[in-house]
Amino acid sequence: MAIAESLKNQRILLAGCGNLGGAIATLLLQSGANVFGLRRRTDQLPQGVTPVAADLTLPATLKNTLPPRLDQVIYCLTPSDYTAQGYHAAYVEGLENLLYELQGQTPNRLFFISSTGVYGQDDNGWVDEESATQPGGFSGRQVLLGEQTALASRIPATVVRFSGIYGPSRQSFLQAVMDGRLNPPDHSNYSNRIHEQDAIRAIVHLSTMAAAGETLQSCYLASDCEPVRLDQVVRWVRQHTDCEEPAGDARSGGRVGSKLCSNRRLLKTGFEFRYPDFRAGYRELIDQRKGA
């Protein structure tokens, strides 16, 4: 089967079908897959996605609800609250509950949507899939536990670590700069990002490889091709659109840590970025705002 046609008739479960999962589901549908979307409120699923009404954190709701003969599972849950327990429920307990209910099925691949928050590096150096994972915060620790749960399961698993996702539906950073609420110092920490369209396309690319029987690694770091200091991004935005002067109480930066995320392994699979750097992505967002 040609790799371009490999998703045709694949039965794929999006476990956690919110904004990101729903967009992945839509692209999979367009590629010919049969897509099932698991979420609590199935009335918000994209058209064409077969609903699976359940709450991954409540095992009883999963009983006799999962579709049979699944080829792939994409686990894409986000916390309902940003606490240690919320992260544990989303990334660990929910996955454990799902894996229990999948007993008796033999999917070919489990994709676990993770985050570069599992890295704790703060030395301005490069990190890749082989780098140490020693997160300092509770969120990174719980996501890492989820990764370990996925990789220890009986289903062949691939972890995909996204850096900061931005795009048409995620414009909080851009808005903060335009409003004068963000004013990092010169030579601030390095930041890493990926446009949401590239994040969606990366998962479908790897899913297509899995369906075609291509060899997949157990982990991919998905970030664009140019890590950059935060103040450089802010300066560029200010040069390309009207922005308020920084407020006196403007935030100086984002999350802790300073590292450069390497996407070399993902690129070696043949994946091509539509937005290889922040300029390509933010230029389009700014142009869209000007044309609105």
Image (spheres, rainbow, N blue to C red):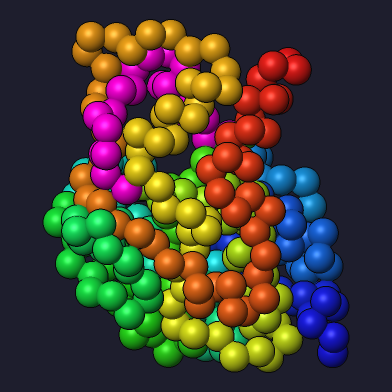
Query: Which region of the structure is painted magenta?
Result: 169-190
> Residue 212: x percent and y percent?
73, 86
Q: Main secondary structure of the magenta part?
A: loop
Q: Using the rendered image of the protein, determine whether residue 1 is visible from the camera's viewpoint.
A: yes
Nearer the observer, 190 or 4: 190
Residue drawn where x is 44% and y is 83% of the image: 218
Q: Is residue 50 covered in magenta?
A: no
Instruction: Count up the numbered dots.
Output: 0
Q: In the rendered image, which quarter is residue 249 located in?
A: top left
Which corner quadrant holds the C terminus? top right
Q: Using the rendered image of the protein, determine whether residue 139 is visible from the camera's viewpoint.
A: no
Residue drawn where x is 65% and y is 59% of the image: 273
Nearer the observer, 113 or 291: 291
Nearer the observer, 239 or 100: 239
Would residue 54 appear left or right of 100 to someone viewing this image? right
Q: Is residue 181 covered in magenta?
A: yes
Would residue 57 appear left or right of 188 to someone viewing this image? right
In the orientation shown, which residue stands out farthest toward the left?
136
Residue drawn where x is 67% and y is 33% of the image: 284
> Residue 167: x percent and y percent?
58, 38
> Residue 39: x percent and y percent?
54, 51
> Residue 87: x percent and y percent?
28, 52
Name above or below for residue 235 compared with residue 143.
Answer: above
Would residue 68 appear left or right of 16 to someone viewing this image? right
Which corner quadrant holds the N terminus? bottom right
Residue drawn where x is 48% and y is 54% of the image: 226
Would residue 134 appear left or right of 4 to someone viewing this image? left
